[in-house]
Image: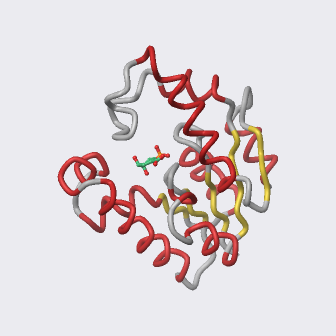
Amino acid sequence: MKIVLLGYMASGKSAIGKLLSLKLNLPFIDLDNYIETCEGISISAIFSTKGEIYFRKKESEYLQELINLKNDCIISLGGGTPCYGNNMDIITNNSKSIYLSATINTIFERLKSETSQRPLVATIGKENLKEYIAKHLFERSPYYSKADEIISVDNKTIEQIVKEIK
Ligand code: S3P
């Protein structure tokens, strides 16, 4: 069985995936890191040199590649992965998917200091960031909500969330 962690940017997918992998003794793969390794270039550089459409195409291809792996593992997705093409069907048909749900305020508090590493929000001023998150999260929620389980991550430690998932 594969466990797939999904959710908006800064919801804790990678950190939770790493700890969960230790607790369950399963390999952990972060889709963004996998894309960067396979493409030999950072996600930010993919966005700036090849564009978002290229990124989304590669994201779907590499997602399928990870889903096709024979062994059980934990996979954390990028924030947008479930929202393009038939990615969410691929995810729900082949794994136990968990939506790490965070409120607009939690996401804003975490994202405001680290927008530069994230191409989608890198050019959005702090004064517009909360409004952007609210709209974007609203658009993405229908996809996220198709996950098998929804876990709220607000005001919880990574250890608490991992315990809940287990
Ligand atoms: C994206 C989120 C990023 C990364 C890319 C696009 C998105 O991953 O995949 O910048 O569309 O929300 P994180 O959710 O790990 O920041």
Task: Count every numbered label the image shows and give the total.
Answer: 0
Q: Nearer the viewer, residue 42 or 46?
A: 46
Q: Quadrant of the N terminus?
A: bottom right
Q: Nearer the viewer, residue 44 or 127?
A: 127
Q: Is residue 41 left or right of residue 34?
A: left
Residue 94 is situated, as x and y percent measured from the top left of the image, at: 66, 77
Identity of the residue drawn at 22% across and 62% down: 40
The residue at the point 39 percent across, 62 percent down is 56
Looking at the picture, does residue 88 appear above or below residue 1?
A: above
Q: Where residue 93 sits: x, y (%)?
A: 69, 77
Q: How is the image coloured?
A: secondary structure
Q: Position of residue 8 (x, y in %)?
A: 57, 43
Residue 79, compared with residue 29, is above or below; it is above
User: Based on the displayed image, in which of its 4 quarters is residue 46 positioned?
Assistant: bottom left
Q: Can you say whether 135 is above or below 49 in the image?
A: above
The quadrant in which the C terminus is found is bottom right
Task: Using the image as rendered, state which of residue 146 and residue 112 is in the foreground.
Answer: 146
Residue projecting furthest to the left: 49
Residue at 22% over, 49% down? 45
Q: Is residue 80 above or below residue 28?
A: above
Residue 144 position, x and y percent, is 67, 53
Give the side of residue 133 with respect to residue 123, left or right.
right
